[in-house]
Amino acid sequence: MSRIYLDSSWYERAASGSLYESEYEHIVAQNAGGLFPDCELLPFEILVESEWGAAKPDLALVRQDYSAWWVVEVELSIHSFASHVRPQVMRLAYGHYGSEHATWLYRESGYVLDRERLVAMLKGVQPSVLLIVDETVPEWKRELGPFGVQIIIFEPFVSDRNAYAFRVDGQLPETDVDHVSRCSRSTVIPKVLVVEAPGALNCADGDILKIVYRDGRSAWRRVDAANQVWLIPVGPTPVREDGPFELVRRGQELELRIADGKQ
């Protein structure tokens, strides 16, 4: 049996099923600061509609610069994969997220997060699903991996004094403070760039941004469409490449560059 020796005490692995899911979710939330620095973990028990049916997630994880967010599902390994875990995750992965979900996050943050940036964030690319489970289940990773689901093993161990320690494994969200958003060319208007994480722009619809590209500075206007946010050059576009692109912040300046290190 796996054990952890910490501060002169032995911690035995807590058997799956020895905690209620609500207790396990509470433990995850209590340790969110260490697990997810630079992010806010918020209750997110709001209905999400999808072509697969409707589902209610457990939590949402929002990066503090609004450049990314995750829908979080907390599960115990004893739950049925076929009848519960897989249907729930697929509904969330292909869910429709809109302003009502941004309002929910705004309220659950205690009205601390910026509602307009939350609304813009939800206009970006589909959020990833982050699945947190109490022990490794190889089938779950094998079945859900192709759909981009990130799985974190947060395995509790308990001492004879009822104190907890944890083994953590899996895909913790990356926090790159310089990264703003990935961008791609519009398939309809080639000179327009579609912003995948618009919540991180920190500007309003119609604002002009000065962006550096290949050592030159040009002006771009932010335009909010129904379900997307665009960057449209003021004048001829200086960008000739097909992309995709990364928008990064260097000090006080925004810089656009070819993604994945391509030049």
Image: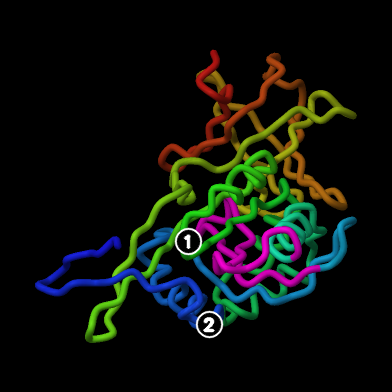
**Residue 123: image tag:** none
Q: Residues within 10 Å of mark 1 (few under 14, many from 20)?
A: many
Q: Which amino acid is tagged 2?
A: Tyr
In terms of sequence position, does the residue under pointer 2 or pointer 1 come before the other?
Answer: 2
Q: Is residue 222 above or below residue 118?
A: above
Residue 56 spot, x, y in % from top left: 74, 72
Furthest toward the front, the residue is 1
- Identity of the residue drawn at 41% across and 41% down: 251
Residue 103 spot, x, y in % from top left: 72, 74
Q: Nearer the viewer, residue 5 or 223?
A: 5
Q: Is residue 173 above or below residue 113?
A: above
Q: Nearer the viewer, residue 71 or 192?
A: 71
Residue 175 spot, x, y in % from top left: 44, 48
- Residue 213 in the magenta stretch? The answer is no
Q: Quadrant of the N terminus?
A: bottom left
Q: Nearer the viewer, residue 220 or 191?
A: 191
- Identity of the residue drawn at 33% across and 65% down: 166
Where disc 2 sits, the SS reads loop
Residue 190 spot, x, y in % from top left: 82, 24
Which residue in the structure is indicated by mark 1?
Answer: 39
Where disc 1 sits, the SS reads strand
Which residue in the structure is indicated by mark 2?
Answer: 20
Q: Which range is magenta? A: 55-83
- Identity of the residue drawn at 55% across and 28% down: 212
Quick check: 258 left or right of 167? right
Q: Residues within 10 Å of mark 2 (few under 14, many from 20)?
A: few
